[in-house]
Amino acid sequence: MSIHIGAKQGEIAPTVLLPGDPRRAKLIAETFLQDAVCFSEVRGMLGYTGRHEGRQVSVMGTGMGIPSASIYIHELLSEYHVNTLIRVGTCGALQPHLNIGDLVLAMAASTDSHVNRLRFHGMDFAPTADFRLLLSAFRAAESMEADVHVGSVFSSDTFYDDDPEAWKSWAAFGVLAVEMETAGLYTLAAKFGARALAVLTVSDSLVHARAASADEREQRFMRMAEIALACSNPS
């Protein structure tokens, strides 16, 4: 039983979907998982395990940002021996060809966080996705006729940046979108020898100054969860 999750051994499946919002973890469990059971309510960060197409799958909120997400991810990997982690969340588009509702599969993640510089004594580590998960998610998205893009993302420690133009430096180097957790996820997955992928939905565009409505966010979020479940199936 870990400090921040509190589940017993065997209550968490080898595959875990990771939305930031715990209410979305509850929504995924109620929508897609059969016989879902809540395994954690510690600090309001809900986690559930149920069956999807005959196999055990878990879903758990992580909160926002690398520090919060890394606590839960580390405990899932070190205490509960999870081997597949799929982040399902939103992102802001940094490129003009990305539209609201498009999917982004994060192949790699840059960051302004110092978490890896601390870990690697001032050097940079390049965290990347698991290729087989990435390929499977891409095929699942194509089969659903979703508008899907594959490339790098930027995991920022800052949601409200004092410099409104700062994102343009990342965009100039081809970074597709900005979010707040993927670099931490991929780094910890590498440390523990696990598979990881971030499946993201464009909720707003810094290029076009547009944002999705609440209804659009929920509709696109459910499709993203479907793709995550499909690509996590080892068969």
Image (cartoon, rainbow, N blue to C red):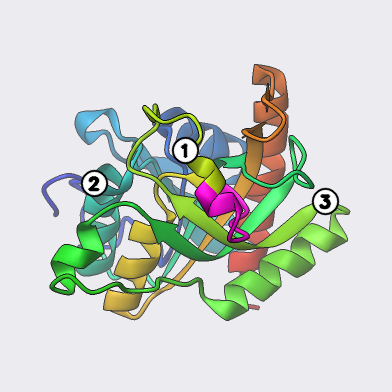
Position in image of residue 54 (x %, y %): 61, 63
Residue 75 sits in quarter? bottom left
Which portion, as a residue range, is magenta?
169-177
- Proximity of marks 2 and 3: CB atoms separated by less than 8 Å: no
Real-space Cα separation, disc 1 to disc 2, in angstroms: 19 Å
Q: Residue at x 20, y 54 (%)?
A: 8
Quadrant where the image shows the N terminus: bottom left
Q: Earlier in the sequence, mark 1 or mark 2?
A: 1
**Callout 3, which amino acid?**
Ala
Which of discs 1 and 2 lies nearer the camera? The answer is 2
- Residue, disc 3: 146
Query: Could you tell which of marks 2 and 3 lies nearer the N-terminus?
Result: 2
The residue indicated by pointer 2 is 67
Q: Nearer the viewer, mark 2 or mark 3?
A: 2
Any part of residue 88 in sight: no
Circle 2: element type: helix
Establish if 213 lies above or below 206: above
The spot of residue 29 in percent (x, y) is 52, 40
How crowded is the residue under tag 2: few (<14 C-alpha within 10 Å), some, or many (20+)?
Answer: some
Q: Check disc 3 and report its element: helix, strand or loop.
A: loop
Whether 65 is drawn above or below 11: the answer is above
* Residue type, numbered disc 2: Pro
